[in-house]
């Protein structure tokens, strides 16, 4: 029935099979064990997990309805959403747990592939070699180590279940088993529509190894073609429905590249070169990256013709050898056919190719290699040794490739190292760097991303955010408008434009921008928060309160909006008169409390200043212009919204006095700037003197947080310069002797805000006071 087969031992004793399975599991687990310590990455993980409120609700009736009714992320894959929801219930924001689920699914897929091929062919050892190559190949790391690609390992799990069930159905022809095939296939399509060519794959397997059709082996014992094809009609119907829903979801989400942007001839050229490139990386896995950009300019037709020659040659050779070696044609057409949905004829996204697309198609190439090796008339021992050496070598490369998925910065720097003119990698690396407070480096990567491809809206938007952080607001507004031009329904761009316009005191334009953002996305919490800030600038305090409340309703964990609303209510209770701005000269600090030499200025030890009727104040030291480094500070205290009293034009325009952050400009309240000179606390030089500050935020990353800095006892923590949008600097230093927390590593609020946990902000140890509930 299977036609001519390689000379090899049939199914091995049970003990051998168990030993091989355990070895496969152990080797695969070793390759992916480092992922237990890995983080999320800024490559779709926010859409799928870290920024998805629906996923974070867990498995509720509302979230179940959303999973089956949503096309979020331009896909319809409800089972993938359910998988992420379950993970969030189990692990929360601990990325290692999410990685563990993906690795577990990959281990299950490895065993399922071994079982399926063993049942289809009746040969254990070649099947085991295919499973080993599948388990450890470096090109599969992307599907396993990337949390957002859970859909790949999950859909493959159900797809291989369907394949295993079909191996039983093909021999018994029991409809009960066929129903199992259909159910498993439907679940696969509901996880990711990668297996839409599965009915064609089954027809291929009917030719070899099942022998139900004679087209590869020439076997005449098989059934007639029509009954075998007819039984696949329900599966073809499922495939067609999945294709239609997927196309609708991706078109609705704007993920499909129009023909005007990428012509048909360019797609065909890329498809041909991708077939050859995937094959090359399967056989020689080097230079793997998370994103492969389309080549800049036109490479001409030569690469496409060369790739076509390779594909045509392998196709002809496998067909010529189909009588004696039918596995070659079966494996090759498995590879070609399973790549069809993702080869780029219908272009989704901006990548030229992706390693994750080979997760299932590569099995065809592995099948050609394994059965080809088994057909060699060579002693068994050298074959086993060679197979073991190849597997171990690939496992070592897979382990190394896994390490690049440690975090966003490592992943994207690797992509830039092995690709050229990669606008996507520059943009996402900029995001990672800006989140880590490396603003200047992030700005450079955003600018490079825009230089490479100025027609992508994401780099334009992120460049605007970086410029706003730098205080270059007019330039930021230009970039936001460019992002909106490229994507008119971009709610985030309108929201950030509102924040920038508010800081430029263009209140009417700011309010209009935020209202447009909310028109596009009524559930945009950040837009509601920014709208509240703009309304407060214009004196519409009731409108500001309402917008803050709506932001909190949309996102109950939105601590920036809660802080802003609490500050507004304390500063100006409903019906109360507006408090006045006040200022007071600080006392001279204790000279012994400040570091000496080479340090510019210092933060005075003094009391918090209260604004009349506001209950709020701030102690801010500003080094006088022209003051030399190391000389005594001349501190001035300012309260109210403006960080520098001399910015009178700003102060006059502000209608209320409360500490908020307006899209990047920080306004602090120091409740205590350390013990007063002469007190018992001050006499203890090793006591920790920490600032307690109340911060209102409209941006999740307003300061360059340092989440990795360790501060040892006696070490001086330094506040570096803070640049405001008008070019002024707030500078200060202080000495903290940390006997209570020796060698402590201070984490960043981004990892999970904890108001009682000290953090390092611009090099200074600060302690947050609990924000208003």
Image (cartoon, rainbow, N blue to C red):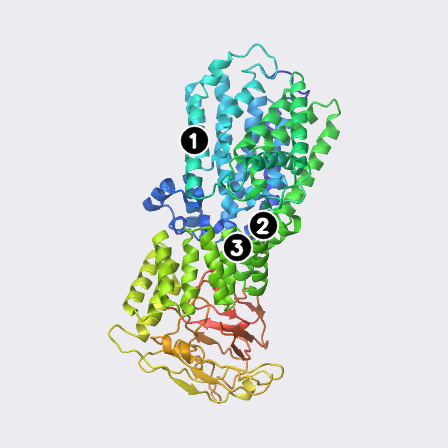
Marks 1 and 2, the one that precedes in the sequence: 1
If you read the primary sequence from the N terminus, does the residue marked by circle 1 or circle 3 appear first? Answer: 1
Across and down, in percent, residue 706 comes to 54, 66
Determine the secondary structure under disc 2: loop
Of labels 1 and 3, the one closer to you: 3
Q: Judging from the image, what secondary structure is the residue with disc 1 in?
A: helix
* Tag 2 residue: 405
Q: Are marks 1 and 3 in contact (CB under 8 Å)?
A: no
Mark-to-mark CA distance, 1 and 2: 31 Å
Name the disc covering residue 186, or none: 1
CA gap, disc 3 and disc 2: 22 Å
Examine the rendered structure and indicate whether residue 253 appears above or below residue 238.
Answer: below
Q: Say whether disc 3 or disc 2 marks the residue closer to the N-terminus.
A: 2
Identify the residue at image location x=51%, y=12%. Answer: 223
CB atoms of marks 1 and 2 within 8 Å: no
Q: Residue at x 52, y 55 (%)?
A: 459
Give me the disc on residue 459.
Answer: 3
* Residue 132 image-quadrant placement: top right
User: Which type of secondary structure does the marked residue at label 3 adopt?
Assistant: helix
Which of label 3 and label 2 is nearer to you?
Answer: 3
Rendered view: 432 above or below 381: below
Depicted 183 relative to depicted 288: above or below: above
> In the rendered image, is residue 459 in sight?
yes
């Amino acid at each position: 029935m299977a036609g001519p087969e390689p000379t090899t031992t049939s199914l091995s004793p049970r003990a051998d099979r168990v030993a091989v399975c355990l070895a496969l599991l152990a080797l695969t687990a070793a390759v992916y064990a480092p992922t237990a310590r890995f983080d999320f990455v800024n490559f779709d993980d926010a859409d799928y997990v870290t920024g998805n409120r629906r996923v974070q609700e867990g498995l509720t009736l509302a979230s179940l309805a959303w999973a089956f009714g949503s096309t979020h992320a331009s896909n319809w894959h409800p089972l993938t959403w359910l998988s992420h929801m379950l993970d969030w219930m189990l692990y929360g924001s601990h990325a290692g747990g999410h990685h563990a689920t993906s690795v577990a699914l990959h281990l299950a897929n490895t065993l399922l592939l071994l079982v399926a091929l063993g049942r289809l062919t009746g040969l254990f050892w070649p099947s085991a070699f295919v499973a080993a190559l599948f388990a450890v190949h470096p090109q599969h790391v992307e599907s396993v180590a990337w949390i957002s690609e859970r859909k790949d390992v999950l859909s493959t799990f159900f797809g291989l279940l369907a394949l295993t069930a079909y191996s039983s159905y093909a021999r018994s022809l029991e409809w009960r088993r066929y129903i199992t095939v259909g159910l498993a296939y439907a679940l696969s399509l509901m996880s990711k529509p990668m297996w839409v060519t599965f009915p064609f794959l089954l027809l291929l397997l009917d030719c070899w190894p099942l022998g139900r059709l004679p087209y590869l082996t020439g076997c005449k014992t098989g059934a007639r073609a029509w009954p075998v094809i007819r039984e696949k009609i329900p599966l073809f119907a499922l495939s067609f429905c999945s294709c239609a829903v997927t196309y609708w979801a991706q078109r609705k989400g704007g993920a499909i590249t129009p023909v005007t942007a990428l012509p048909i001839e360019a797609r065909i050229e890329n498809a041909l070169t991708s077939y050859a490139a995937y094959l090359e990386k399967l056989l020689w896995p080097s230079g793997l990256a998370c994103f492969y950009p389309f080549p800049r300019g036109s490479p001409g037709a030569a690469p496409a013709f060369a790739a076509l020659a390779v594909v045509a040659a392998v196709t002809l050779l496998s067909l010529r050898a189909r009588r004696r070696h039918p596995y070659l044609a079966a494996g090759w057409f498995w590879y070609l056919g399973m790549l069809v949905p993702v080869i780029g004829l219908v272009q989704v996204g901006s990548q030229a190719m992706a390693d994750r697309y080979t997760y299932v198609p590569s099995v065809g190439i592995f099948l050609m290699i394994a059965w080809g090796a088994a057909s060699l008339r060579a002693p068994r021992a050298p074959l086993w040794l060679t197979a073991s050496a190849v597997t171990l070598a690939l496992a070592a490369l897979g382990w190394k490739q896994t390490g690049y998925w440690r975090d966003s910065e490592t992943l994207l720097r690797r992509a830039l190292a092995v690709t050229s003119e990669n606008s996507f990698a520059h943009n996402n690396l900029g995001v990672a760097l800006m989140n880590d407070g490396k603003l200047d480096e992030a700005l450079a990567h955003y600018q490079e991303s825009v230089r490479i491809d100025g027609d992508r809206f994401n780099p334009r938007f992120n460049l605007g955010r970086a410029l706003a952080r730098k205080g270059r607001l007019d330039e930021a507004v230009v970039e936001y408008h460019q992002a909106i031009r490229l994507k008119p329904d971009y709610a985030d761009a309108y929201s950030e434009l509102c924040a920038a316009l508010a800081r430029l005191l263009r209140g009417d334009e700011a309010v209009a921008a935020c209202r447009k953002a909310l028109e596009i996305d009524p559930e945009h919490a950040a837009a509601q928060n920014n709208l509240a800030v703009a309304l407060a600038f214009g004196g519409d305090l009731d409108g500001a309160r309402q917008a803050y409340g709506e932001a909190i309703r949309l996102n109950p964990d939105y601590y920036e909006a809660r802080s802003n609303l609490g500050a507004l209510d304390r500063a100006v209770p409903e019906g109360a008169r507006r408090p006045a701005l006040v200022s007071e000269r600080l006392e001279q600090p204790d000279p012994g409390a400040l570091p000496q030499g080479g340090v510019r200025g210092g933060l005075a030890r003094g009391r918090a200043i209260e604004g009349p009727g506001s209950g709020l104040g701030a102690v801010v030291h500003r080094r006088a212009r022209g003051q030399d480094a190391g000389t005594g500070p001349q501190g001035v205290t300012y309260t109210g919204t403006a960080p520098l009293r001399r910015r009178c034009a700003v102060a006059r325009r502000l209608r209320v006095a409360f500490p908020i952050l307006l899209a990047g400009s920080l306004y602090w309240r120091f409740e205590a700037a350390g013990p007063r000179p002469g007190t018992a606390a001050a006499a203890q030089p090793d006591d920790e003197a920490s600032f307690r500050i109340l911060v209102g935020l409209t941006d999740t990353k307003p300061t360059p947080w340092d989440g990795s800095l360790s501060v040892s006892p006696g070490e001086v923590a330094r506040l570096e310069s803070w640049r405001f949008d008008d070019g002024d600097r707030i500078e200060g230093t202080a000495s903290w002797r940390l006997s209570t927390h020796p060698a402590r590593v201070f984490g960043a609020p981004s990892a999970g805000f904890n108001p009682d946990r000290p953090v390092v902000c611009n090099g200074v140890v600060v302690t947050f006071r609990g924000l208003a509930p």
